[in-house]
Amino acid sequence: GQQVMQIPQYQHVQEGEDFTTYCNSSTTLSNIQWYKQRPGGHPVFLIQLVKSGEVKKQKRLTFQFGEAKKNSSLHITATQTTDVGTYFCAGRTSGANNLFFGTGTRLTVIP
Amino acid sequence: SQTIHQWPATLVQPVGSPLSLECTVEGTSNPNLYWYRQAAGRGLQLLFYSVGIGQISSEVPQNLSASRPQDRQFILSSKKLLLSDSGFYLCAAGGYLNSPLHFGNGTRLTVT
């Protein structure tokens, strides 16, 4: 079955440092979405990437979709304490209704 | 915009007892609906999804079942809970083609 892996599982950074999480799928994806889950909360949609090689930015967050549409990354520049949470990628194969979530990366930002 | 209502927020149930979690959706019609489970500190496991009334797809064989009696109502059930059923249950709506998922606030279930 489809698997979506993320690395690292955990990341501790000093406030102001950069952070990157990587997402890899065992199958080619039609699109990939990124979500953020604050501690004790529910996942909240951040962004979607559809095109091969696509790059999107949201303030300090940069999202990339690989050329082969099997991997993606999220990079946060100059982390802040408000960035704390678990970041999930979620992928869908062509024509599928279900969305498979990655294993998530839990980010801790040390003030 | 969509609003996902889930209740209860927390639940403690003994092993062997039944379970019924309800999810209702506002702000959209004919949504795709999903049940996910998240074990403590873990990722999201897709349990069931539905593309319409009475249409349920199961991703993981287990002692849970789902039903969709109305367009915007999705129910997760069990006849007899196991300890391993403990977790954070999340209902979500949307996800049609390229649309994002909107999650409810979740139910934290502890089976004792």
Image (tube, rainbow, N blue to C red):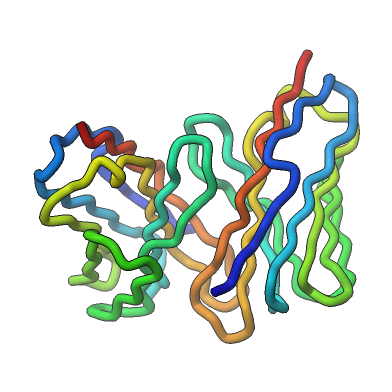
Residue most extreme to the top: A111
Residue most extreme to the bottom: A95
- Where residue B2 appears, x then y in whole percent? 45, 58
Classify residue A24 as left or right of residue A92: right
- Where residue B22 appears, x then y in whole percent? 23, 53
* Figure quadrant of the C terminus of chain B: top left
- Where residue A101 appears, x then y in whole percent? 58, 58
Classify residue A73 as left or right of residue B53: right
- Where residue B104 appears, x then y in whole percent? 40, 48
- Relative to A80, residue B106 above or below: below
Question: Which image quarter: residue A84?
Answer: top right
Question: Which image quarter: residue B87?
Answer: top left
Q: Which residue is depicted at the point 79% across and 61% down?
A: A72
Q: Which residue is depicted at the point 85% across and 45% down?
A: A75
Along the viewing direction, whichever of B36 and B29 lies nearer the viewer: B36
Along the viewing direction, whichever of B9 and A103 lies nearer the viewer: A103
Q: Which residue is depicted at the point 74% across and 47% down?
A: A7
Along the viewing direction, whichever of A83 and A21 lies nearer the viewer: A21
- Relative to B52, residue A19 above or below: above
Q: Which residue is depicted at the point 67% across and 51% down?
A: A46
How many labels sit on residues? 0
